[in-house]
């Protein structure tokens, strides 16, 4: 019972850190394309008196990346359904030219206003509509959720680190006497810390297996039946085999740092 | 005969030199000599012993053990030197989660001897210290005298060049004390092991010739 308790005291905070790392990886992967779409899907509407070319707009502001003409006939067909063709032709002649203009990067509301200002300096441009608020709020909401999750992961990591430090103190108490006696008789560091390393490496493997099992369950059972579109679409992204190596690497790194800290703080003879 | 231990203008201090315990001490100890170091409580007997196994570096001067200057020795060399020392503590310093037999063969384990050799040596040494029947027990199951005999067996297990003993019979009954003195006398006489014993009192019955140093007022003086 004591044996299991001693192991769990280290395995559980280690699992918490590994869960944090894996959540970070998964969230980054699954939201990457959404974030990209949010950025790339954005266009502003530019209304000109005469047909315009992209090079002209690029000269006005270098962030202009693409330009797509909106067919005026479609607009007229939409807004003047019930009028005769002659009138429709007159409306078409009087109608300005509409363009969807894409940008090369994500720009905040102030940046959008600056682009609008630059473009409106051209006398050919009648109006620029940035849709800044809806674009910005969608992106900000997304960024906020992402930031909150990362903050939670960091917080969880810090709490887990404190638990690991606590366990290190227990290790120190339990192994100090033996390590010091071995040191007096000339045992090299690896021999002194051998027992502790064995315990810690077993815990690192156990924590990796538990974390991997949890994410494999999420990937193959929970996500598949969740009904959440993004989860079902991105099922492959939820856990990759390469993640096992990342988790094991992280667990071993934590374990090595923890064990060496205990070994070095146990140096010297207890008076 | 060559010096196994040599101190020259040795100063030992704690708190980065602020608290001097031994000052400007010089002495030589040859191979196979039996040496008692006595002195009042707090005079620095144990401090000198700590310096001899490299736990406390000299603040000034030189302290050479087995050809290694402990003032400048590197960690790797210090580890190697310690494998040639047999150290006995007043508080035994046994590993309580190990059996008596495993405690005894610790120096052999460190030196990388096979398990068979370790087992054979453990049996032989425990027979010497009259603890054969306790091989599989744990230290806390033994009396103080028995634990100290385990400590002595451990110190002798690899035929050390030097035995350093800190009050080895301090709290022990006469029987255990006699066993321990016999073992150390035998090691000194038969194996030419240099033995340094820090003690309050030199045993009244002691068959070997010995040297006697006294530590007083920060100095180390030989009593003739």
Image (cartoon, coloured by chain):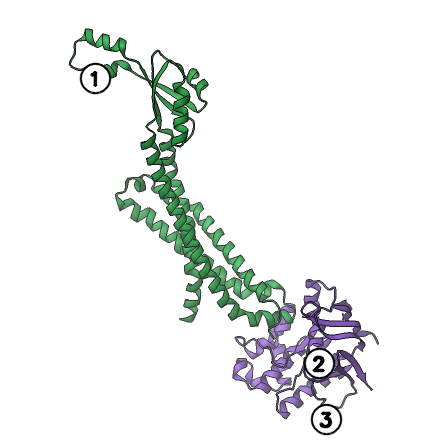
Chain colours: A green, B purple
Q: Which residue is mark 2?
A: B43
Asked whether the beta carbons under mark 1 and mark 3 sit within 8 Å of each other, the answer is: no
Q: Estimate the x, y position of residue A7 in percent, counting from the top left.
A: 44, 64
- Residue B62, given in percent of the width and then of the height, sits at 78, 69
Q: Position of residue A142 (x, y in %)?
A: 35, 39
Residue occupying image coordinates x 69% and y 85%: B183
Residue at 77% over, 70% down: B64
Asked if residue A264 lies left or right of residue B202, the reply is left
The numbered mark, 3 or 2, whose residue comes first in the sequence reads 2
Which residue in the protein does label 3 denote?
A: B204
Chain letter of the residue beneath label 3 in the structure image? B
Q: Residue at x 76, y 74 (%)?
A: B23
- Give above or below for A120 relative to A201: above
Please indicate whether residue B212 sits to the left or right of residue A189 in the image.
right
Q: Are marks 2 and 1 in contact (CB under 8 Å)?
A: no
Query: Label 3, label 2: how many angstroms apart (C-alpha)?
Result: 22 Å
Q: Residue A61, relative to residue B211: is it above or below? A: above
Residue B131 seen in render: no
Chain holding disc 2: B
How far is mark 1 from mark 3, CA to CA? Answer: 122 Å
- Tag nearer the camera, 1 or 3: 1
Is disc 2 placed on a helix, strand or loop?
A: loop
Residue A141 in view, yes or no: yes
Under circle 1, the secondary element is helix
Q: Which residue is mark 1?
A: A79
Mark closer to the observer (3, 2):
2
Cα–Cα span, label 2 and label 1:
107 Å
Q: Quadrant of the C terminus of chain B?
A: bottom right
């Amino acid at each position: 019972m004591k044996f299991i308790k001693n192991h769990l005291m280290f395995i559980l905070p280690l699992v918490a850190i590994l869960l944090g790392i894996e959540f970070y990886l998964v969230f980054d992967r699954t939201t990457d394309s959404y974030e990209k779409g949010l950025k790339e899907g954005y266009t502003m509407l530019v209304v000109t008196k005469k047909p315009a070319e992209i090079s002209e707009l690029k000269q006005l502001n270098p962030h202009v990346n693409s330009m797509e003409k909106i067919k005026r006939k479609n607009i007229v067909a939409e807004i003047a359904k019930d009028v005769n063709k002659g009138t429709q032709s007159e409306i078409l002649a009087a109608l300005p030219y509409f363009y969807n203009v894409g940008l090369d990067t994500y720009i905040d509301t102030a940046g959008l206003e600056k682009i609008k200002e630059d473009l409106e300096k051209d006398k050919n441009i009648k109006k620029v509509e940035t849709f800044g608020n809806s674009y910005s709020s969608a992106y900000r909401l997304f960024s906020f959720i992402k930031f909150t999750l990362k903050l939670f992961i960091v917080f969880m990591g810090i709490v887990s680190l404190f638990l690991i430090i606590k366990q290190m103190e227990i290790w120190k108490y339990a192994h100090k006497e033996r390590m010091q006696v071995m040191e007096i008789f000339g045992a090299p560091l690896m021999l002194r810390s051998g027992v502790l390393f064995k315990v810690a490496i077993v815990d690192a493997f156990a924590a990796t297996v538990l974390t991997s099992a949890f994410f494999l369950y999420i990937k193959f059972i929970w996500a598949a039946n969740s009904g959440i579109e993004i989860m079902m679409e991105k099922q492959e992204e939820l856990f990759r085999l390469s993640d096992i190596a990342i988790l094991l690497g992280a667990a071993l790194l934590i374990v090595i740092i923890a064990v060496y800290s205990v070994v070095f703080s146990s140096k010297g003879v207890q008076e | 005969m060559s010096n196994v231990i040599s101190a020259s203008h040795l100063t030992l201090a704690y708190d980065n030199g602020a608290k001097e315990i031994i000052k400007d001490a010089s002495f030589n100890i040859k191979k196979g000599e039996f040496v008692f170091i006595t002195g009042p409580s707090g005079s620095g007997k144990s401090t000198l012993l700590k310096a001899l196994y490299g736990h406390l570096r000299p603040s000034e001067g030189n302290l050479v053990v087995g050809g290694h200057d402990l003032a400048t020795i590197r960690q790797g060399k210090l580890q190697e030197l310690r494998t040639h020392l047999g150290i006995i503590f007043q508080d035994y310093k046994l590993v309580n989660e190990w059996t008596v037999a495993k405690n005894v063969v610790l120096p052999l384990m460190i030196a990388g001897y096979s398990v068979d050799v370790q087992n054979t040596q453990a049996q032989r040494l425990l027979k010497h210290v009259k603890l054969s029947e306790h091989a599989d027990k744990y230290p806390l199951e033994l009396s103080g005298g028995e634990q100290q005999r385990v400590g002595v067996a451990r110190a002798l297990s690899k035929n050390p060049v030097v035995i350093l003993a800190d009050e080895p019979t301090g709290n022990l009954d006469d029987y255990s004390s006699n066993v321990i003195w016999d073992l150390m006398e035998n090691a000194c006489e038969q194996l030419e092991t240099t033995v340094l014993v820090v003690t309050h009192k030199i045993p009244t019955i002691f068959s070997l010739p010995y040297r006697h140093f006294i530590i007083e007022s920060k100095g180390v003086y030989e009593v003739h």
